[in-house]
Image (cartoon, rainbow, N blue to C red):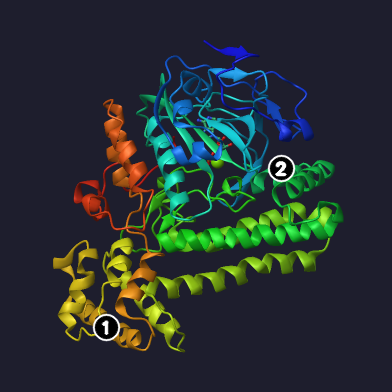
Amino acid sequence: MHTSVSDHSEVALAFENHFADTLPGDQDHHNTRRQVTGACYSFVAPTPVSAPVLVAYSKEAAAELGLREEDCRSPWFTDMFSGNLVLADMKPYAMCYGGHQFGTWAGQLGDGRAINLGEVVNGGNQRWTLQLKGAGPTPYSRSADGLAVLRSSLREFICSEAMHHLGIPTTRALSLILTGDRVLRDMFYDGHPELEPGAVVCRTSPSFLRFGNFEIFSARKEYDLLEELLRFTIKNDFPGINESSGVDSYLEWFTEVCRRTAIMIVHWMRVGFVHGVMNSDNMSVLGLTIDYGPYGWLEGYDPTWTPNTTDAQGRRYCYGNQPYMAQWNLMQLANAIYPVVKEEKRLQEALDTYRFTFQEEWQRTLKAKLGLHTTEKNDDQLISSLLELLTKTETDMTIFFRNLAHLEMSEKNGDRLLEIVSDAFYAPDDIDQDHLNHLKSWLHLYRLRMRRNELDDEERRKRMNLVNPKYVFRNYLAQQAIDKVEQGDYSEVEELLDLFRNPYDEQPERQRYAAKRPEWARNRPGCSMLSCSS
Ligand code: AMP
Ligand code: MG
């Protein structure tokens, strides 16, 4: 089944291997699980699969690689992106990294089920690394199987592309392929494993380097390698920084990582995205959202909510903690590069960039979410009292902000003001009068504030709708698509891909996708809470 060919003339991609050709690799070429020292990666081939079937591909991600529709529909595409076709110009490898998991140093982790096929340089001279997720064991697989199942793969595939169209920095996803093999998973870690359909996603990114790629070398005191990787990253992915200026360039790089991370987190907070596993091995040094596992979207606005059952006790990675957890991870990265920077004060100053950027951008974003065009001294109070009110009764975050844009500043009637946002309530009949009165007062204040805002209703609505999405990838929508694919129907995947091409636009014929989570989904596995087991 596994084909390794030198001449596959119909293949529309040429591969380069800059990462593997430039950086030191593991001398041992056997695919056995082990600690890998003195290396950034280990060569390893994807494991062939028995009967690959293409479920869907992203035409936008394909276009970035210069691939046309007929390329994506060719047999070689399915073969290559399931791991069955390895060309002579590819040198597949898994990356070595470590990480802090739930606050504790976990040692070597590495690509346990991800294999980089190589790099493709597109017509615009942009370099993309292509990575298969779920393509079989690697030296970093530890006790796991290196595989992925349909449900987690579909969630990663669609969400990556949805995030891209939402304007949020993210790794991309090219394809979703069923392998034809079954994979054993204990979804709830409750001793009831089941066989599930296996799948492989091809992810693309300029780089898949994580904080953990740098942490591992520091933990092992492999400082030469740490500097080599730093210089490589700066040269390849941060062209604005002069990599030959030593410590200065490391500090400039770290400042930029802090800035990008802050901007990414502001975006997550803006749309109600909860990553779920913000371990330092899941943080990209490019400031991209990476590793879509048990993520979720806030439905009821609750800052303590986490989709991750593994984190249900501590809620370390809940929505409201994300800004602090990003900072905590950046602190680990600062510690990791300290041995080659050796300047505590300047490193601390660089780290402060995170806090300043986050605060500034988050305030700006909150103002934009409310359509505040001018600035008044009570604006902060207006915003914080709203966020406080939203936690008092289960209120859908996405629907609330979207509907708030419809408020007309001439409307004086409190009940009618309330009606504008009441669609966002999950249990309208259970809300006490006190809360409704508070919300009415807030809406009155907001209405009066809008009268001093120098924008008419129409212009304000237009601007608010550019930052408050209409459609987000609610977990129950993912579950419905998974159920259909399991029955052989791939149409819902296409429908969702298409829906999320324009998440800020009204799509009247698709209004149902903007609906609140239905009651049946409140406690259904996969719809409200997810485990890391995927
Ligand atoms: P995650 O928290 O899902 O990003 O994964 C943490 C670590 O576990 C990474 O090193 C992954 O490569 C590894 N891992 C997760 N699932 C598997 C699997 N099914 N097989 C091998 N390694 C895995
Ligand atoms: Mg990970």
Is 354 situated left or right of 51 in this image?
Answer: right
Please give left or right for residue 244 compared with residue 83 in the image. right
Q: What percent of the width, then of the height, locates residue 68?
A: 48, 32
Disc 2 under 8 Å from ligand 1? The reply is no
Callout count? 2
**Mark number displayed over residue 328:** none
> Mark 1 is on which residue type?
Met
Identify the mark at residue 216; answer none if there is no mark.
2
Q: Residue furthest top?
A: 1
Circle 1 sits in a helix, a strand or a loop, which is it? Answer: loop
Q: Position of residue 91 (x, y in %)?
A: 68, 24
Query: In the rendering, at what x and y percent does residue 9 appear?
Result: 59, 17
Q: Residues within 10 Å of mark 2 (few under 14, many from 20)?
A: many
**Camera-side residue of 161 and 381:** 161
Assess whether mark 1 and mark 2 are in contact (beta carbons under 8 angstroms).
no
The residue shown at (72%, 65%) is: 350
Does the Cβ of the disc 1 residue fall within 8 Å of ligand 1?
A: no
Residue 132 in the figure: left or right of residue 396: right
Mark 1 surroundings within 10 Å by alpha-carbon count, few (fewer than 14), some (14 through 19), many (20 or more): some
Q: Which disc is residue 409 wearing?
A: 1
Residue 417, compared with residue 85, is above or below; it is: below
Q: Quadrant of the C terminus?
A: top left
**Residue for point 57% across, 24% down:** 137
The image quarter in which residue 487 lies = top left
Residue 241: image location, x then y, percent: 76, 56
Distance of label 2 from label 1 (alpha carbons): 56 Å
* Three-letter amino acid code of the residue under disc 2: Ile
Image quadrant of ligand 1 equals top right
Residue 106 in sight = no
